[in-house]
Amino acid sequence: MLLADKHDLQEKLKLSLILIEEKELNFYTQNCYTVGTQAALLSGFAFSAIVSGSDDAAVELQTLWGCFTTMAMLFEILAVVKSMQLSIMGPGLALRGPEGSMTRAVLVMRSEYKNIHMLFYTGLFFFHLSACLFLWSTYDTIVAAINSVLIALALIWLYFDFGALEKRLRLPGRHVRRDAPVDGREISYDAATMHVLRPSAVD
């Protein structure tokens, strides 16, 4: 009887950990949808700018503007593709993979989600540079200078606002919590994220 109760407790603990990881998987999947949609919008803007480029500017400005606009489009397309891959392959692995696939899917999506953010914000940075060079290649010097200052201020504000918001919403520091053994092994997980840790992560 005691052994059966112990086995039932272990199964309930496994189920509760899987449910927690499922919520985290859905969280990253929904975020991939959101970032991918916005990246697709920006890449469409960049492609439209390339198609309707001006031929009146100097060759140097045209070259720089074309490079920055193309880089903006490419980085946003990369963000779209990676978001699509994660939102399809991550839940697919968790649903149809062998035991432990849920944990693996969450770990991969967590790390790759940071790469998606990097791609998106890099494309956004080149998008602003492209807009600045378009002003210099199209408008008078005074108009281009004034609007370039506005774009630079917007970039600076975006950088500091992102840092401040990230600091306010940052997860607390890692605190390892250990629970009852499962299959003879002690369960350790991050108390901040409720994610099961590998033995190497807590040594």
Image: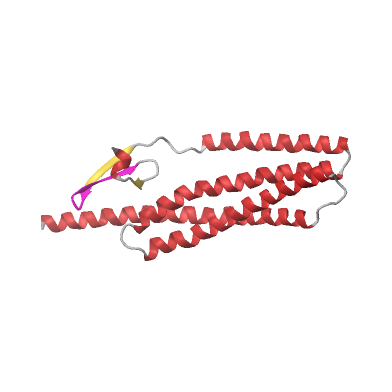
Query: Outermost residue toward the bottom?
Result: 96
Q: x, y percentage for residue 51? A: 78, 58
Magenta span has 168? no
Query: Which is the main secondary structure of the residues drawn in magenta?
Result: strand
Q: How is the image coloured?
A: secondary structure
Query: Outermost residue toward the front?
Result: 59
Horizontal side of residue 99 vs 123, given as left or right: left
Which of 49 and 155 lies nearest the eye of the viewer? 49
Horizontal side of residue 143 vs 32, given as left or right: right
Q: x, y percentage for residue 100? A: 32, 57
Query: Outermost residue toward the left?
Result: 1
Q: Residue at (27%, 53%) from the top-left corner?
A: 13
Which of 59 and 108 lies nearest the eye of the viewer? 59
Task: Look at the image and tell me in which quarter the N terminus lies.
Answer: bottom left
Q: Residue at (21%, 54%) from the top-left corner?
A: 9
Where on the picture, by quarter, is residue 133?
A: top right
Task: Look at the image and tell me in which quarter the C terminus lies.
Answer: top left
Number of disc labels:
0
Q: Residue at (50%, 49%) from the top-left corner?
A: 113
Q: x, y percentage for residue 39? A: 63, 53
Residue 123 versus residue 95 in the image, above or below: above
Q: The magenta stretch spans which residues? A: 181-190
Q: x, y percentage for residue 11? A: 24, 57
Magenta span has 188? yes
